[in-house]
């Protein structure tokens, strides 16, 4: 499973990108709004942090077909290669996915709440579909199960499209999807940090250092005489 940072906080992206094996960054208009600056500047800064080889996802905001196409062109122009344009998985979004596929622009069908929405986005040519796990849970359904269904639909129909599971609030949701072999997950920086935030881990590591120091008086191998 590839792992993306679902965030536009530049400090958080810098830190996660440096210390964790991530594959890129995903954004949406609400995430960009939290950065409180021109969204183009934020996206360019994210591209600079992650470099040109990692993937960045940015969403078209206009809800008309023509506007989605214009937004997609602008996003790709701004961010260069390894850019994926997110489009809502709606009839207008499907039309834009089909048109952009012909132009060779990579798209992601986002705002996915149902498996059939994902099926249609994949069929329309989207390279990714983004189901919202936690939001589905909050509606009283099982978000993890919906994502598994979508992964099955894509696999069983040999569709050229990957799941980008999104909207996570805890490690357990991500763990269940990693175990299932879902293609991609995108998580806010604090959710990614939560994967290894554990007092048992910290305690075990400190014990190793303390035991070594008791033996040698040193806290690193390279300090030994
Ligand atoms: C990513 O593609 C989604 O836009 C995002 O994960 C939604 O997350 P939220 O439900 O926390 O807003």
Image (cartoon, helix red, strand yellow):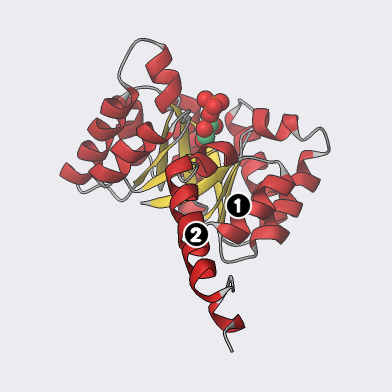
Q: Nearer the viewer, residue 134 or 71?
A: 134
Could you tell me which secondary element the residue under label 2 belongs to?
loop
Looking at this view, is 42 or 93 the one in front?
A: 42
Residue 206 x %, y %: 51, 55
| Percent coordinates x, y for residue 63 in the rendering | 61, 25
Q: Which mark is residue 128?
A: none
What whole-number distance in Å separates the C-alpha atoms at marks 1 and 2?
A: 8 Å
Extreme residue toward the top, this view = 140
- Numbered marks: total: 2
Residue at position x 34%, y 48% in the image: 183
In the picture, the disc for residue 16 is 1
Q: Which residue shows up at 59% across the image and 74% down it?
A: 218
Is 87 left, or right, of 79 in this rendering? left
Residue depicted at x 64% and y 60%: 50
Q: Which residue is mark 2?
A: 21
Dot 2 crowding, Cα within 10 Å, few <14, some 14–19, many 20+: few
**In the rendered image, which quarter is residue 66 located in?**
top right
């Amino acid at each position: 499973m590839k792992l993306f940072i679902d965030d536009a906080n530049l400090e958080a992206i810098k830190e996660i990108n440096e210390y964790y094996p991530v594959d890129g960054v995903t954004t949406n208009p609400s995430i960009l709004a939290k950065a409180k600056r021109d969204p183009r500047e934020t996206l360019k800064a994210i591209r600079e942090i992650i470099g040109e080889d990692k993937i960045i996802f940015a969403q078209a905001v206009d809800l008309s077909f023509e506007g989605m196409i214009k937004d997609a062109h602008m996003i790709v122009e701004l961010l260069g290669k390894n850019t994926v344009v997110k489009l809502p998985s709606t009839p207008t979004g499907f039309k834009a996915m089909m048109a952009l596929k012909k132009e060779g622009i990579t798209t992601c069908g986002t705002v996915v709440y149902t498996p059939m929405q994902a099926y249609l986005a994949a069929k329309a040519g989207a390279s990714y579909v983004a189901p919202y796990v936690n939001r589905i849970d909050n509606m009283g359904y099982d978000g993890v199960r919906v994502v598994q269904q979508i992964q099955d639909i894509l696999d069983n129909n040999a569709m050229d499209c990957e799941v980008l599971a999104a909207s996570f609030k805890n490690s357990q949701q991500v763990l269940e999807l990693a175990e299932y072999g879902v293609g991609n997950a995108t998580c806010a920086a604090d959710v990614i940090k939560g994967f290894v935030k554990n007092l048992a881990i910290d305690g075990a590591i400190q014990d190793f250092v303390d035991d070594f120091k008791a033996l040698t008086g040193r806290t690193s191998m390279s300090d030994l005489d």
